[in-house]
Amino acid sequence: MIRVLIERHIAETLETAYEERARKVLQRAVNTPGFISGETLVDSHDPNHRITLANWRSEADWDRWYHSPDRKELMAELAPMMDRDEMITVLEQSAMP
């Protein structure tokens, strides 16, 4: 299993529109093979900073979703509402105990 950390920063006044579209992205991801679970958090010091932590069966599953036409179409709607580029970090469990 891998975890994918997705950070987005929403432009001022676009929070409601962003939330509606971000929900659609998550709903589509949930139905994607390899998706295990996910949660979205709000930075307590910056309410426009959103962090999504998603669990995927494998990096290959994540890559398929990330490069899919479906995600690209959804992100084309979401990207104009962000005032910074999306940051993505793929994480795997450390071999250390």
Image: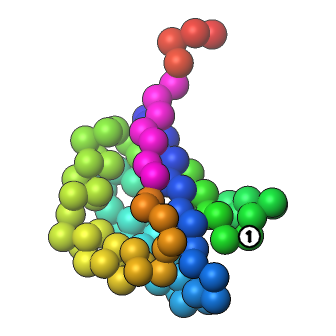
Left or right, residue 15 beside residue 43 = left
Measured as percent of width and height from the top left, residue 22 is found at 49, 76
Q: Magenta region, mostly helix, strand or loop?
A: strand
Q: Nearer the viewer, residue 5 or 29?
A: 5
Q: Is residue 92 visible?
A: yes
Residue drawn at x 65%, y 64% is: 49
Measured as percent of width and height from the top left, residue 64 is found at 22, 53
From the viewer's perspective, is residue 17 above or below residue 28?
Answer: below
Quadrant hosting residue 35: bottom left
Residue drawn at x 68%, y 61% is: 41
Q: Does dot 1 land on a helix, a strand or a loop?
A: strand
Measured as percent of width and height from the top left, residue 14 is found at 58, 87
From the viewer's perspective, is residue 23 above or below residue 56?
Answer: below
Residue type at tag 1: Pro
Measured as percent of width and height from the top left, residue 96 is found at 58, 9
Q: Nearer the viewer, residue 20 or 46?
A: 46
Left or right, residue 16 beside residue 33 = right
Left or right, residue 91 beside residue 71 = right
Magenta includes 92?
yes
Rendered-image quadrant of the C terminus: top right
Residue drawn at x 32%, y 49% is: 62
Q: Residue furthest top?
A: 96
Rendered-image quadrant of the N terminus: top left
Give the magenta-colored segment's residue range.
87-93
Q: Which residue is tagged 1?
A: 47
Q: Nearer the viewer, residue 42 or 94?
A: 42
Q: Residue furthest left?
A: 69
Residue drawn at x 57%, y 66% is: 9
